[in-house]
Amino acid sequence: MKILEIQDLNVKFTTPIGEVYAVNNASFSLNANETLALVGETGCGKSVIANTIIRLLPQNAEISGNIFYKGNNLLKMSDREMEKTRQQEIAIIFQNPTLSLNPLYKIGDQISEPLLVHKKINKKEAFTKTKKLLKTMGFQNPSKFTGMYPHQLSGGMNQRVLLSISLTLNPSIIIADEPTKGLDNELVRDIIEEFKTVNKINNSSLLLITHDLSIARELSDRIIIMYSGDIVEITKTESFFKNPLHPYSKILLNSLPERGFNPPKGNSPSMVNIPKGCKFHPRCPHKKKICSEKTPPIYSIDEGDVRCYLFQ
């Protein structure tokens, strides 16, 4: 069952250096209790999609298309309705956990605040649930940590605090934007295990935004690959790692250490100077004449959806 459906989403930013086409004709769905990974290089538009879903884009953004959550179009909701949805139904975990937490408030207060505001329970009940959430997220002495401030915790601990906050109101969807960025390998492993715990106890759908294929492999049911504002492949995670469809996907996989650590050659095109045709064609080893002339459509095949003329 689809809980979130994005249809023909376009996001453009007007800037002093020109118009930036950040997301182009993006369409995909997130199912109930599913983990969907949105993967691509930095600047490909994946975080823009996340912020469009929760309507936290700057004023210079122009948006077209539809985003349906449980049948309601998020882009047509009033500000008040959207704020309520953002607070209670769709939780987001931003990239930098330290900056996402208020440095002036204790950890316990920040976790319990949504409970006090929206659940109308007393402070004792809120702190009981707060400590339970912290323990679930791996804090062995939760009473100690409720009285601490964000600067007293490590980046990994603050990330787990954000996870705790996201779970307070049992949201239907959790959006995690690069949750392991900047963390060392040991902490990354811890965060992966915490997300697995979240899936077990909360039954939320998870939209995982990441540039790290190893994280996507561990956590996701399906993978979406983005390149320079375009979705180029949607497939099941297991299928992706056995037989990626798009030429860019194959190159991304070859950048993994176990596959020889061969990062993609060249650079993504400028978002204000987009090449004609397929945006990947300047870097593609399989390009044909049509690739530089016309943008390929999405082709649906048994293994998934792919934007490439090799499948026409």
Image: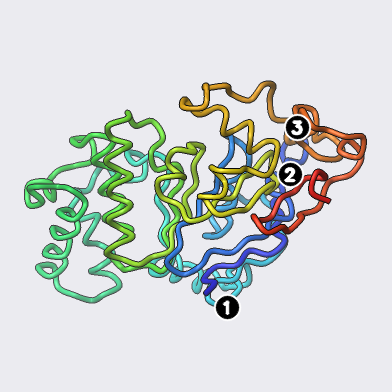
According to the picture, the residue beneath numbered tag 3 turns out to be 17
How many neighbours does mark 2 have within 10 angstroms: few (below 14), some (14-19), or many (20 or more)? many
Q: Please say if 99 is above or below 231.
A: above
Identity, as a three-letter code, of the amino acid under mark 2: Tyr
SS class, disc 2? strand
Task: Give 47 or 278, whichever is nearer the viewer.
Answer: 278
Q: Residue 114: image x %, image y %?
A: 28, 65
Question: Of 138 and 55, which appears nearest the observer?
Answer: 138
Mark 3 secondary-structure assignment: loop
Indicate the amino acid at tag 1.
Gly
Say few, some or many: other residues with alpha carbon within 10 Å of mark 3 (under 14 / 14 to 19 / 20 or more): few
Residue in the foreground of this view, choosing between 114 and 292: 292
Task: Residue type at mark 3: give it.
Answer: Ile
At x 7% / y 47%, what residue is drawn?
Answer: 144
SS under mark 1: loop
Residue pointed to by mark 2: 21
